[in-house]
Image (cartoon, helix red, strand yellow):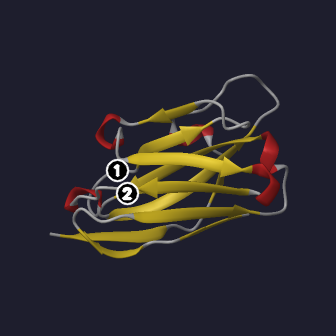
């Protein structure tokens, strides 16, 4: 199971830190992704991180503003979001891909077997 938290209302230019707590499985063997879905839009990948945390991927629209990280000892992943914009308003989901392979991260929604319930981020202008 995955539990996302940390969303809320913030003014443009502000910051939030999202957390994803995992339970019931080998989190250390899971690549993690953060996705978001804005009203009326498709779900999209924001960032992804490898099992060890050594490799990361960012969508162009968040590069330089967001940072993905993880702490396997705490079975948790994080998304630090800085310089937030109104366009960042969305429900944010964490997802995990359990794998024993060498692919560092995954970018497609269909690659992820486990999903959290989502946390709403609202950025006011």
Mark 2 / mark 1, whichever is N-terminal: 2
Answer with left or right where residue 86 lies relative to residue 99: left
Q: Quadrant of the N terminus?
A: bottom right
Q: Answer above or below: position of 68 versus 53.
A: below
Determine which residue is flagged by label 2: 37
Label 2 – label 1 distance at C-alpha: 6 Å
CB-based contact (under 8 Å), mark 2 and mark 1: yes
Answer with left or right where residue 83 lies relative to residue 95: left
Residue 2: x and y in percent read 68, 63
Whether residue 35 is visible: yes
Q: Secondary structure at mark 1?
A: loop
**Farthest residue in the left direction?**
125
Q: Nearer the viewer, mark 2 or mark 1?
A: 2
Q: Residue at x 44, y 43 (%)?
A: 45
**Farthest residue in the bottom direction?**
9
Q: Residue at x 66, y 49 (%)?
A: 70
Residue 102: x and y in percent read 74, 22
Answer with left or right where residue 101 lies relative to residue 3: right
Name the one closer to the observer, 95 or 12: 12
Splitting the image into 4 quarters, where does residue 83 fall?
bottom left
Which mark is drawn over residue 34? none
Label 1 crowd bin: few (<14), some (14–19), many (20+), radius 10 Å: few
Determine which residue is flagged by label 1: 42
């Amino acid at each position: 199971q995955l539990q996302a938290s940390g969303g809320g209302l913030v003014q443009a230019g502000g910051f939030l830190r999202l957390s994803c707590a995992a339970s019931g499985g080998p989190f250390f063997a899971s690549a993690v992704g953060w996705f978001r879905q804005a009203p009326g839009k498709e779900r999209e990948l924001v960032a992804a991180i490898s099992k060890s945390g050594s490799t990361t991927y960012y969508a162009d629209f968040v590069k330089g503003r967001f940072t993905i990280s993880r702490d396997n000892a705490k079975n948790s992943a994080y998304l630090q979001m800085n310089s937030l914009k109104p366009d960042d308003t969305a429900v944010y989901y964490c997802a995990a891909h359990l794998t024993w392979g060498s692919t560092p991260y995954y970018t497609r929604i269909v690659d992820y077997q486990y999903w959290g319930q989502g946390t709403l981020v609202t950025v006011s202008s």
